Image (cartoon, rainbow, N blue to C red):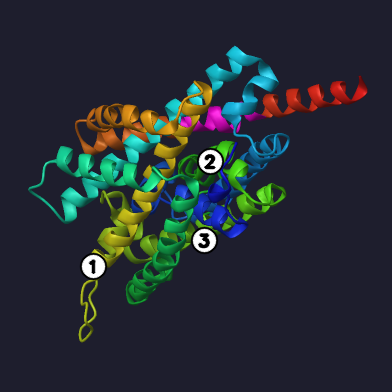
């Protein structure tokens, strides 16, 4: 049973959904998308990626709405049997654990590169993991309230620092539209869709909602907000730095913010502000993934979640420390995206069909 203090409003659910979706992609998506497409038309790829992800999210939501008050880790066995349901649930948990490890490693890389150059990665990762543990130990209710505070701050600071780069913006860097046809846009859609992958959060989030019938609204609103963030980022980064400039940079969004300064203000350089809020967003994705994995394990093995949280800490740490370089970290991110596309883009379709068939048979009998 979900505790009453863990029940969240529709707005809080949207905030959690967006916080899970917007993470490392804002910092690296302009480069990865342009590398795939090779043209400035990746803003169209963002729109297509958002539509594809919305469809996956709606399917996942419709599946969860058939079992109100339950997460997939609880109702999976009712669809495909106890053992297969547990096996699929464990695959979902493995994905959340890997996401948590990836996000905490990206967090450490960004902090190490821009803020604490001499600090070893393991020290940053361990610190962030324990802070994450503290934030999730009291459940979804406290986690949602935390993100409710972070989210508006993120919007204000992000829009401020990105829009202040308007002086560097050149519309010609986004032209010609579809100059090389549609194929580059479709190639870029692969990268943008991987950054949008977020349907998986609905395997457990719907169970915590006070109004689960609003689940589709959460998905549509959440992906729309994330899409606007990604669209703004890509347009301004490519418009200011050009396609060739973006592909030469590891963190093009941060490099854009570092490329201008405004004299006479309290802050003359703004990358530190963006770093602070985006470290919070990375931390949000890490925390949600960490919580989802521990929740799933506790429900599958019918145990308390706190011991599962402790048990996952060394696992997340070992996975986070496995990549030896930033390039290997990005490769891990690509692998996570491909696995997510299968687990949460393809697997839910037969599960939804089986669920509907079972319910019709039950009503018929």
Q: Which residues are magenta?
A: 338-348
Answer yes or no: is residue 50 visible: yes
Image spot of residue 348 (x, y percent): 64, 29
Where is residue 39? Give x, y as percent: 43, 51
In percent of the image, x 33 and y 33: which residue is there?
Answer: 331
Q: What residue do we see at 46% from left, 44% from top?
A: 139
Mark identifier at residue 201:
2
Asked if the stretch drawn in magenta spans residue 230, the answer is: no
**Numbered mark located on residue 123 in the image:** none
- The CA distance from mark 2 to mark 1 is 36 Å
The residue that mark 3 highlights is 228
Note whether 189 is above or below 269 in the view shown.
above
Residue marked by disc 1: 259
Q: Could you say which quadrant of the image residue 202 lies in?
A: top right
Q: Nearer the viewer, mark 2 or mark 1?
A: 2
- Residue 93 sits above or below residue 143 on the image: above
Q: Residue furthest bottom?
A: 264
Q: Residues within 10 Å of mark 3 (few under 14, many from 20)?
A: some
């Amino acid at each position: 049973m979900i505790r009453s203090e863990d029940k969240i409003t529709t707005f809080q659910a949207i905030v959690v959904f967006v916080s899970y979706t917007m993470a490392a992609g804002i910092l690296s998506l302009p480069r990865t998308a342009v590398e795939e497409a090779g043209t400035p038309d990746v803003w169209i790829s963002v729109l297509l990626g958002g539509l594809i992800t919305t469809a996956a999210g709606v399917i996942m939501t419709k599946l969860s709405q058939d079992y109100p008050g339950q997460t997939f880790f609880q109702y999976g066995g009712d669809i495909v049997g106890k053992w297969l349901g547990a096996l699929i649930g464990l695959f979902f948990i493995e994905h959340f654990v890997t996401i948590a490890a990836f996000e905490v490693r990206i967090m450490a890389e960004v902090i190490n590169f821009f803020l604490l150059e001499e600090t070893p990665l393991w020290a940053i990762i361990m610190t962030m993991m324990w802070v994450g543990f503290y934030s999730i130990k009291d459940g979804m209710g406290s986690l949602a309230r935390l993100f409710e505070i972070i989210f508006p701050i993120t919007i204000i600071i992000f829009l401020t620092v990105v829009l202040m780069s308007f002086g560097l913006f050149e519309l010609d860097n986004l032209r010609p539209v579809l100059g090389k046809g549609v194929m580059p846009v479709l190639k870029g859609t692969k990268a943008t869709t991987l950054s949008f992958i977020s349907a998986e959060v609905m395997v457990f989030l719907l169970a915590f909602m006070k109004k689960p019938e609003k689940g589709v609204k959460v998905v549509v609103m959440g992906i729309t907000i994330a899409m606007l963030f990604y669209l703004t980022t890509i347009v301004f980064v490519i418009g200011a730095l050009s396609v060739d400039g973006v592909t030469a940079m590891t963190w093009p969004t941060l490099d854009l913010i570092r490329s201008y300064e405004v004299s006479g203000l309290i802050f003359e350089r703004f990358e530190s502000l963006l770093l602070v809020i985006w470290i919070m967003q990375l931390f949000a994705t890490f925390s949600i993934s960490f919580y989802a994995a521990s929740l799933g394990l506790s429900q599958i093995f019918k145990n308390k979640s706190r011991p599962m949280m402790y048990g996952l800490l060394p696992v997340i740490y070992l996975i986070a420390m496995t990549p030896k370089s930033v390039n290997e970290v990005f490769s891990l991110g690509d692998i996570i995206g491909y696995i997510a596309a299968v687990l949460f883009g393809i697997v839910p379709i037969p599960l939804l069909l089986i669920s509907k068939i079972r319910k019709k048979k039950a009503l018929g009998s």
